[in-house]
Image (cartoon, rainbow, N blue to C red):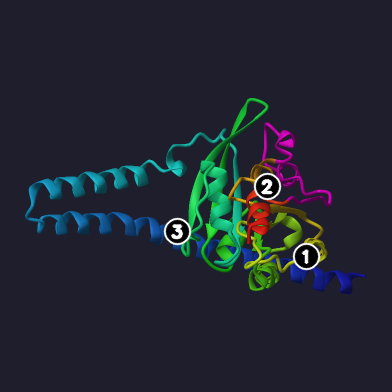
Amino acid sequence: KEAAERPSLRGRREREDHRHLANSAAIRAEIQRFESVHPNIYSIYELLERVEEPVLQNQIREHVIAIEDAFVNSQEWTLSRSVPELKVGIVGNLASGKSALVHRYLTGTYVQEESPEGGRFKKEIVVDGQSYLLLIRDEGGPPEAQFAMWVDAVIFVFSLEDEISFQTVYHYYSRMANYRNTSEIPMVLVGTQDAISSSNPRVIDDARARKLSNDLKRCTYYETCATYGLNVERVFQDGKDLLSSSSMSHSTIAGFLNIDKMSHSSGTCLFCKYSLMFN
């Protein structure tokens, strides 16, 4: 019995050592990033002296000062410890429609263009009178280790009109599994249908989408249409009444995203119906 326990203890120590090294590397990288900001800002101020037009020089200077102030007063230095956060990552390829999904949720409007570089967004959500800071990280590429360790929950997005975007979800999920135990991460799967028509038909049927959601540890699956907002709000907000007012535990996050049980919410966008009728 003792001989069997030794390898287990050795493995636990190795994991702890690996975690320590990873944390140390992340801390050093963050310090380097933080300390690089002001030297670059000072360089901009020096370059501004070469701008001969006084009005333009002052305008640029004011913008740089605003950027510097925003950096100095970022949430890590100013936000109360009592304000809970939820960190949600959005992943999918350029054809997935993820940027339109996020834009629709944040603004209530539709934009067709996909953002190659992704984006970072913040939104206040209120549950039972308690405010929460929702951090949304739209990744411009495949998930890396830093992203995997940052997220509290992940939304995988593919287009119902695009086979490659569908296969990309499998690839991205596998990458996530390389960096972190996926059983620790609540997940949502989204199939977008923003421009389905006779000339641009649906290629991913319901059965394949359901199988993918099962493969992703039986996560919730939604079909959305950012054009008219079908199911967009539900992707981010279903189950938010289950949020704890005191902590953001795994079970709380799962409640927020309503993924502890398999569910399926589909629908047909009115715009897509219209396009099919007249194409």
Instruction: Give percent across and percent down for residue 111.
Output: 50, 52
Determine which residue is flagged by label 3: 30
Viewer-side label of 3, 2: 2
- Is residue 178 depicted above or below 100 in this figure? below
| Label 2 Cα crowd, 10 Å radius (few <14 / some 14-19 / many 20+) | many
Front one among 223 and 144: 223
Point out the tag, 1 or 3, that comes first from the N-terminus.
Answer: 3
Question: Do residues under tags 1 and 3 come within 8 Å of each other at their CB atoms?
Answer: no
Tag 3: amino acid: Glu
Front one among 25 and 106: 106
- Whether residue 245 is in magenta: the answer is yes
Give the residue drawn at x 71%, y 69%: 203
Magenta-tinted stretch: 238-267
| Label 1 Cα crowd, 10 Å radius (few <14 / some 14-19 / many 20+) | few
Point out the tag, 1 or 2, that comes first from the N-terminus.
Answer: 1
Tag 2: amino acid: Val
Q: What distance separates the C-alpha of mark 1 from that of mark 2?
A: 20 Å
Question: Which disc, if any, is residue 235?
Answer: 2
- Is residue 38 depicted above or below 96 in this figure? above
Tag 1: amino acid: Asp
Instruction: Give percent across and percent down for residue 60.
Output: 20, 49
Question: Do residues under tags 1 and 2 come within 8 Å of each other at their CB atoms?
Answer: no
Instruction: Give percent across and percent down for residue 143.
Output: 59, 66
Q: What distance separates the C-alpha of mark 1 from that of mark 3?
A: 43 Å
Give the residue drawn at x 62%, y 61%: 148
- Is residue 260 depicted above or below 157 in this figure? above
Front one among 207 and 176: 207
